Image (cartoon, grey):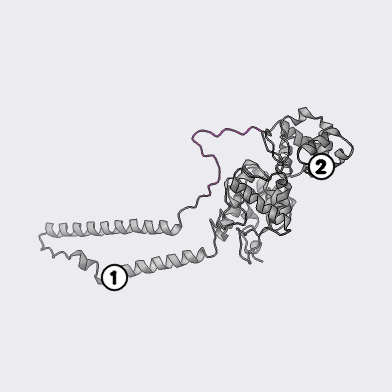
Amino acid sequence: MRLASAEVTAAAGEKIFKQYCTSCHKAAPFDAKLVGPALKDVEKRRSEEWLIKWIRNNAQLRASGDKDAIAIWTEYGKNEMPSFASFSDDEIKSILAYIANPPVAAAPVAGQPGGATQGAPSAGSSVWLYLILGVLLIIFVMLVRANRTLKRMTIAKDGHELEEEKPWSKRLTSAKAWALYGLILVFLAGWTITDSAIRLGHSKNYTPPQPIAFPHDLHAGTLQINCLYCHACAEKSKVAGIPAVSTCMNCHKGVQQGETEAGTAEIQKIYAAYENNRPIQWVKIHNLPDHVYFNHSQHVTVGKIQCQTCHGPVEKMKTMYQFASLSMGWCLNCHRQTEVNFQGNEYYTMYTELHEKVKQDTSYAVTEAMVGGTGCQKCHY
C-alpha cells in the first residue's frame, strides 16, 4: 500500500489513509469526529511542516513543548496517536493531498445495477432439477395422450374397430408404468446422492453466533476501516489473522459507547476481555479442508485480489457469513477468469510463447489458468 517512489498524489494518499488512518479518523468527506478529530480543511488550520511532524511522531512533537500538539492530545482524552516514523515526506504529503481533494463518488446511472455483489442465498440446483423434471413429466404425459388420441383417430378413419380404452387406474399401475417409475426413482436417487456428495463440507451462508456482535457494515462500510487494519496478516502470511483485543482497543479506548444500548453492551465485552487479559474466542467462519493449500498473501499482495471477491460485500454485512461455497469448482472458475499482471511480474518471464502473443496483441488477456493455475499441485501438495 506504500508508495513505490517519490510521488505525491491524492490517489496514493487514499490508499495509505484507508490502510492506516480510518481506524481513528472518519473517511471522506472528513466532516465528523471519530476517535480523532475531523480532518476537513486540516491543511488550512495547520501548516504542512507542522502536519508532517505531527503525523510522523506526535509524541516527539508534544515533548518539544508544542502548545497546539499538547492541546489536541488533551482535548481527545490523551489517546496516544500511533507514530508513523517510516513514512516519507512524500507519503505524508500524499495523505494531505487526499484529505484536501478527496475523489467525488460517481452517481449511479439510472436503470443500471449498483455493482455490489449480491450475497443473498440462491435456489439450490436440486430444486431446479425437480422443477425441470416436473415440467418434462407433464409434457411427456401430454405427448403420450396426444399420440394415443391421434392413433385412435387414424384407426377410426380406416374403419377398424376401436379397442376399449383402459381406465387411468390400470394404466398407472401397469408393468410399463412401474418400470418407468423405477427408472425415475433411480435417476432422482442417483442425482441427489451425487449432488449431496459434491456439496459435502460446503458451508455457503454459514453464519455462526459470535461472542461479540461485530457489525462489519459499520466498521468496513460506514467508517471505511480497511480490512487490512484488523486482518493485517493477509498481506504477508498464509492466513488473514484474527485481530487481538489490543487492536480493538486502539479505537475503543476512545469509543466506549455504541449507537444503541445493545451496541454499548457489546463494546463492554471488549473491555472485559482486555481488563481480564483474555482473548476473544471468535468463531472461524471460512474453513478449507486440510488437504487444500491457500495463501492469503499470494492473492492479496501478488494477485491484487479484493477481499470481496471471496468474502462477498463485507461492507454491507451486519452479521458476517460465508458468501461463497469455496468449493474446488468455484476456485477453478476464478482461476480461469482472473487475469494476471503478466507484463509487470518477472516470475512469468518463463512463459515466452505467451509473452510473444502479448507483444503482438496488447489486448490479449492471460489468465491464471494459462500459467498453471488449474493444476492439481497448485493447491494439493
Q: Which residue is mark 1?
A: 178
Residue 309: percent from the left, percent from the top? 60, 50
Q: Which residue is mark 2?
A: 87
> Of the residues shown, which amino acid type is indicated by label 2?
Phe
Residue that appears at 57% across and 45% down:
316
Q: Main secondary structure of the magenta part?
A: loop
| Residue sitting farthest toward the top | 44
* Label 1 crowd bin: few (<14), some (14–19), many (20+), radius 10 Å: few
Can residue 244 be seen here? The reply is: no
Specify which label sits upstream in the sequence, 2 or 1: 2
Q: Which residues are magenta?
A: 103-119
> Of the residues shown, which amino acid type is indicated by label 1?
Trp
Residue that appears at 68% across and 46% down:
256
Helix, strand or loop at label 1? It is helix
Whole-angstrom CA distance, mark 2 to mark 1, is 78 Å
Q: Is residue 22 left or right of residue 48?
A: left
| Residue sitting farthest toward the right | 64
Q: Is residue 130 left or right of residue 8?
A: left
Q: Is residue 280 left or right of residue 193?
A: right
Residue 12: percent from the left, percent from the top? 73, 38
Residue 210: percent from the left, percent from the top? 60, 56
Helix, strand or loop at label 2? It is loop
Q: How many marks?
A: 2
Residue 128: percent from the left, percent from the top? 41, 56
